[in-house]
Amino acid sequence: MDEHGACGPHDHAHDGPVAPGPARTADLVARAERLAQDRGLQFTALRRRTLEVVAEEGRPLGAYDIAERLSAPGKRVAAVSVYRALDFLTEHGLVHRIASRNAFVPCEHGHGAGESAVFLICRRCGSVDETISTEIERSLDRTLAQAGFKPASRIVEIEGECGACQGRHEASLPPD
């Protein structure tokens, strides 16, 4: 996990970070283009730029921050337009909304049907790491079945302190 953002692509085991940058952004945009073409969807310039901004940032961004980055002198992009683009990107699994932060991070891999996303959110540095857990999946499946509940999304957010921040904190403590 990088110090300020989401983790990189993985085969559902944590392989570590992919730093924000042109290669990561290009991969995400290419995935979005393929998805749009395969599903007969419009991948508009605003949707593309919104995805690029989220991917390039390396940390969760709110819609107003995205709108600010997309705006140019004399040409303001409205937050409502960004929200529409984010709705599209979220619906098609290209970004995730972190509800506790009302912010968005890129999704760098596809999810299987009914698969949950688990976000580990560091309160200290603000990093967000995405992973999955088969144990959480099984427990959640049982809980949902017992309740007779069909979820629209399966996102779990866990707040705490990431390993890097724990290490920095422990390193700053005086020796015993």
Image (cartoon, helix red, strand yellow):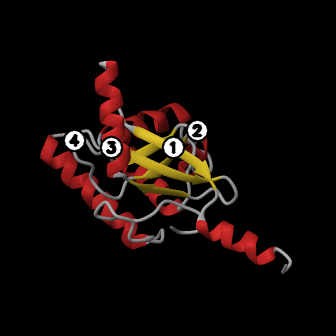
Residue at (60, 41) in percent of width and height: 101
Q: Residue reaching furthest bottom?
A: 175
Gap between marks 4 and 1 measured at Cα: 19 Å
| Horizontal side, residue 68 vs residue 86: left or right | right
| Horizontal side, residue 80 vs residue 32: left or right | right
Gap between marks 4 and 2 measured at Cα: 24 Å
Residue at (15, 41) in percent of width and height: 39
Q: Secondary structure at mark 4?
A: loop
Q: Are marks 4 and 1 in contact (CB under 8 Å)?
A: no
Residue 60 x, y percent position in the rendering = 55, 51
Which of the two labelled residues, at mark 4 and mark 2, occupies the earlier sequence position?
Answer: 2
Gap between marks 2 and 1 measured at Cα: 8 Å
Q: Which mark is residue 157?
A: 1
From the viewer's side, name the closer residue of 124 and 160: 160
Q: Which residue is mark 2?
A: 100
Residue 137 x, y percent position in the rendering = 33, 43
Closer to viewer: mark 2 or mark 3: 3
Q: Which mark is residue 137?
A: 3
Label 3 crowd (10 A; few <14 / some 14-19 / many >=20): some
Gap between marks 2 and 3 measured at Cα: 21 Å
Residue 116 visible within the image: no
Give the quarter of the image for residue 47. top left
Gap between marks 4 and 3 measured at Cα: 12 Å
Q: Which mark is residue 113?
A: 4
Which of the two labelled residues, at mark 2 and mark 3, occupies the earlier sequence position?
Answer: 2
Which of the two labelled residues, at mark 1 and mark 3, occupies the earlier sequence position?
Answer: 3
Closer to viewer: mark 1 or mark 3: 3
Which of the two labelled residues, at mark 4 and mark 1, occupies the earlier sequence position?
Answer: 4
